[in-house]
Amino acid sequence: MISNFFIISPRGDTIIAKDYRSDRGDVGAHERSHTEAFFRKIKFWDDMAADGSEADHESSSEQVEEGKRKANAPPVIMMPDGLSYFHVKRNGLIFACSTARNVSPTTVVELLSTIAKVFKDYCGTLSEEAIRKNFILLYELLDEMMDYGYPQVTQTENLKAFVYNEPIVVQPVSNTGNMVNPKTASANAVHKPVISSVNANGRKNNLNSNQKNEIFVDILERLNIVFSNNGYILNSTIDGCIQMKSYLAGNPELRLALNEDLIVGRGTGQYGSVTVDDIIFNDCVNLTEFDSARTISFVPPDGEFSVLNYRITGEFNAPFRIFPSIEEIDSKKLEISIMIRAEIPTNHFGANVRVEIPLPRCTAGASCNVITSPGAGPNSAEWVQGDSKIVWTMKKFPGGSEQTMKAKITLNHSCTTQIRREIGPISMSFEIPMYNVSNLQVRYLRIAENMPGYTPYRWVRYVTQSSSYVCRL
């Protein structure tokens, strides 16, 4: 299947490399020359894609060239050495492999994602330092997970019987913000390995003796919404999942209850507070009581896993609405005004909000003015000349408030219809903690059997993120 596997750091250094077969009879792809060439290919993919456009079609290919310049490298790349390279990015690290054979790209990308997940389960956190300190453990995992380039055992709980090395605990990356509710569990509490570990001084940490019986539940929703220039929703979908990470001793059976009036499938003639198009459950889930009581039971496997994935299409309340307007002051000056309204309850807020407005390439300058409402965090907007776009960032966007940004654009040429088309679309990224759009709720999470003295800690978190939040102009 694959010839070799390697991990590249953000600087281009090869951290882990393992050769499974030599398809060509010479050096493998994990050698320095091959990994450096592959790293340069994906690192500078934007410039290479832009240079690859034909110069004699300038007028017709300007937008195509601009799109290529902003694109990311695809997960599958054919290199001059004749090998096909596959890669995924996790926390800045590049998990990659190569093969000379005709394999399914989807299967290989899924394999790389699974390897990254298993490494995170056993190291606790996925970082360059954690990989360097646990390289013996990770090589042992690779030996058990693949044989001659073919996947063998890829589940965290099944690998525990074959792995004998203990992980060295590494402190996770420092907290990115101070907006965490002090009554909730620390974000670092979930960054723990699934097996007993040793600390930096070599002292053993017994998983069962000094750790609580805890289970972490995340209800994560990613929004894909397209707005028209007057604020109406043209297309909207929600891709949601319920993820868990269990640290329960003895792996007891759990029962999880969802909304009682949850409706699966549209067009059934039934109505409820939550209607999903489809749901995909994990293989470990028992669905005996799902149709009658919307309750599922399962024995949680080791490590992080998805209990279920669901998809919602149709109408729902968008958390933010975008209202843009463009006014032509004179032949070479434009004024862009963008008003964003937060249609979420006042006790919630959007965090790390970022709005990008692409401008024409003939833009000579732009000045931005931000009108903030009370309660908003640091708020700034600036023109990025190199990318020819305006970047508007907000640390905190309170619910029920409005934020407005006005920009005056100066052009090198007179404004034409073609130049107007180069403005936009507006893209927005954000995260809303402890809020979900679909209203899917976890009614309770409990142990199926009555176990006296067994009192686990249950941490439930709701997160809404933007996947593709776009407004056309």
Image: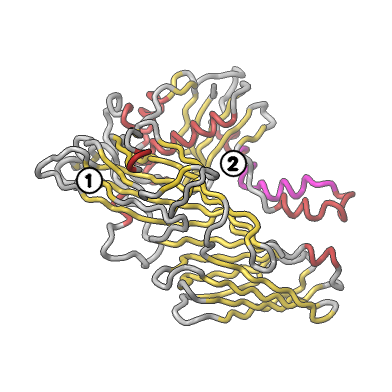
* Residue extending farthest right: 56
Label 1 sits on what residue type? Answer: Asn
Query: In screen coordinates, is 327 left or right of 152?
Result: right
Which residue was labeled with disc 2?
39
State whether residue 22 is above or below residue 169. Answer: above
Which residue was labeled with disc 1?
201
Label whose residue precedes the other's in the sequence (1 or 2) = 2
Quadrant position of the N terminus in the picture: top right
* Residue extending farthest front: 269
Over which residues does the magenta segment extend? 38-54
* Residue drawn at the location 47% of the way across and 58% of the way down: 437
Q: For residue 122, say whether it is visible.
A: no
* Residue drawn at the location 13% of the way across and 40% of the way down: 451
Disc sitting over residue 433 in the figure:
none
* Residue drawn at the location 17% of the way across and 40% of the way down: 208
Label 2 sits on what residue type? Answer: Phe
Q: Which colour scheme is used?
A: secondary structure
> Is label 1 in contact with label 2 (beta carbons under 8 Å)?
no
